Amino acid sequence: MLNTQRLVDGFHAHFNGNPAIVVRAPGRVNLIGEHTDYNDGFVLPMAIDRAAWIALRPRTDGRVRIRSLDLGEESAFELGRLEKGTGWVEYIKGVANELQLAGNTLTGWEGVLSGDVPIGSGLSSSAAVELAAARAFAAVSGIEWQPAQMARLAQKAENEWVGVKCGIMDQMVSAAARQGHALFLDCRSLACEHVPIPDEAAVVVMDTATRRGLVDSAYNERRGQCEEAAHFFGVAALRDVSMSDFERRQSGLSDIVRRRARHIISENERVLEAAQALYANELARLGELFNASHESLRDDFEVSSAALDQIVEAAREQPACYGARMTGAGFGGCAVALIERDQAGAFVPAVLTAYRLRSGLEAEIFACKASAGATIESL
C-alpha cells in the first residue's frame, strides 16, 4: 500500500500547505471473464490493494492543477475551457468533461497524484486514475457518490475523450468493490453481487515483465469478430447465445469467427460457474475453471503470449496452485493464480525461478488482498 505521508509531503512541497483530503481508487485483477465485458457478458474481477491516490484541496477559480509525483510532471487545465491534449492528465480531464456533460457544476482543485498499480500490466491503472479523479471532483463539488453512475462516466471518459474502447468492468470494480470480496458483474445491466473470497485462498498476480504490443489493433479486430458472430446469430451480443445454440449453428461461421465466439460463450458459462464455486468454497473447481479459461484464451481467442503461457505453466507446477490463467486483454502483462494462502511464501520464489529458467525474464509476483472501491481516506 502506498504511504500517504509521501502524498502529504509531496503536496506540501508543491503547494506550500496541507491537502484537505486524500482519495484513492484501486486497480483490479480479473479472476475470470476475459473479453466478455464488451459482449454484454459476465465478469468476476477483484479490486487489489494497489491503487491511484490523490491528495488535494479545493480552489476557487475553476482551475485544476495536478502534479504526478511518479513522473515528476505537472499539468493544469480550466474546467470552463477543456481541450484535448496528450498524456496522463487526459484521464482526469475526460472525467471532468463527462461529469460536466452530466449536468454537474464542478469545483477546481490542486493536488498530487501517485500510484502503485503497474502501468501497462493489465491491472487497470487508467481506471484507478479515472475513479480517483471522480472521487476528488465529487468530494470538492458536493456531488453524491454513486458508484455505478461514476463508473459509467469514467468509462465514457476513456471511450470518448481518451479514445480507448474499453468495456465497463475496470471502472465498475474500481468504483464499487467491497473489501474481502470479488465482484460478480453483469456487464449489460450493471447488476452486481459481492462474492466473498475464502480466507484459505490467496490470489497471486504474476507480472511477466512484458508489456502488451499490438493490443489496440488486435482488440478492435477481436471486437469486430464478436460483432460479426452476434450478427450471424441474430442477437444483440454473444451473451445471448447458449452453447447448445452455438453448437447447432456454428458451421455457418468462418473458422476464426467460430473460435472467437466459442471462447466468449464458454467463458460466460465459466464465470457463472466460478461465482458459484466461490460461494460454495469449491477452490479446486474454481482452479479448473481458471485453467480452462487460459486454454480458451490461448487457442480460441488467441490473445495469450509465450511469456504468459510460460508463467502460467510455472505456476501450475506448484503443489499449492489450484489454477492459473492470463488476465487482462492479453499479449503480455499479467497472469493470475489461485493458491493455498498458507503456501504463498513458497509459491512466489518457486514461480520466479521456474519462469526465469523458461523465459530469461524477471517477473514481479505478489499476493494481493481484495480491497474496497474508491474511497476518501483519513489524513
Image (cartoon, rainbow, N blue to C red):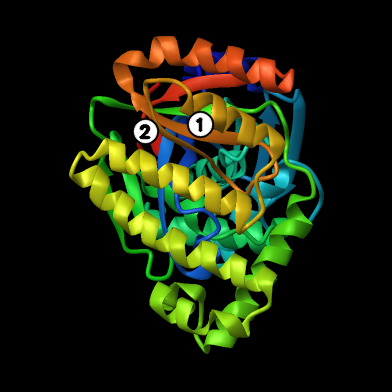
Query: Which residue is more in the foreground, 274 or 126?
Result: 274
Near mark 1 (Cα within 10 A), the count class, few <14, some 14-19 or many ≥20, is many
Residue 231 point in image, percent of width and height = 59, 85
* Residue 197 image-quadrant placement: top left
Query: Which residue is more in the foreground, 180 or 279?
Result: 279
Tell me: residue 158, above or below residue 4: below
Q: Is residue 4 visible?
A: yes
* Image point (39%, 47%), residue name: 289
Tell me: residue 200, above or below residue 141: above
Tell me: residue 68, above or below residue 276: above
* Image point (61%, 72%), residue name: 258
Residue at the spot of label 2: 371
Which amino acid type is marked by label 2?
Ser
Using residue 286 as the reference point, say whether residue 294 is left or right of it: right
Near mark 2 (Cα within 10 A), the count class, few <14, some 14-19 or many ≥20, is many
Alpha carbons under labels 1 and 2: distance apart? 10 Å
Query: Which residue is more in the foreground, 38 or 317?
Result: 317
Residue at the spot of label 1: 51
SS category of the residue bearing label 1: strand
- For the view shown, which residue lies furthest in the left direction? 280
Which amino acid type is marked by label 1?
Ala
Residue 96 point in image, percent of width and height = 60, 54
* Image point (46%, 20%), residue name: 1
Tell me: residue 346, above or below residue 58: above
* Residue 256 image-quadrant placement: bottom right
Instruction: Check contact, mark 1 vs mark 2: CB within 8 A.
Output: yes
* Residue 84 image-quadrant placement: bottom right
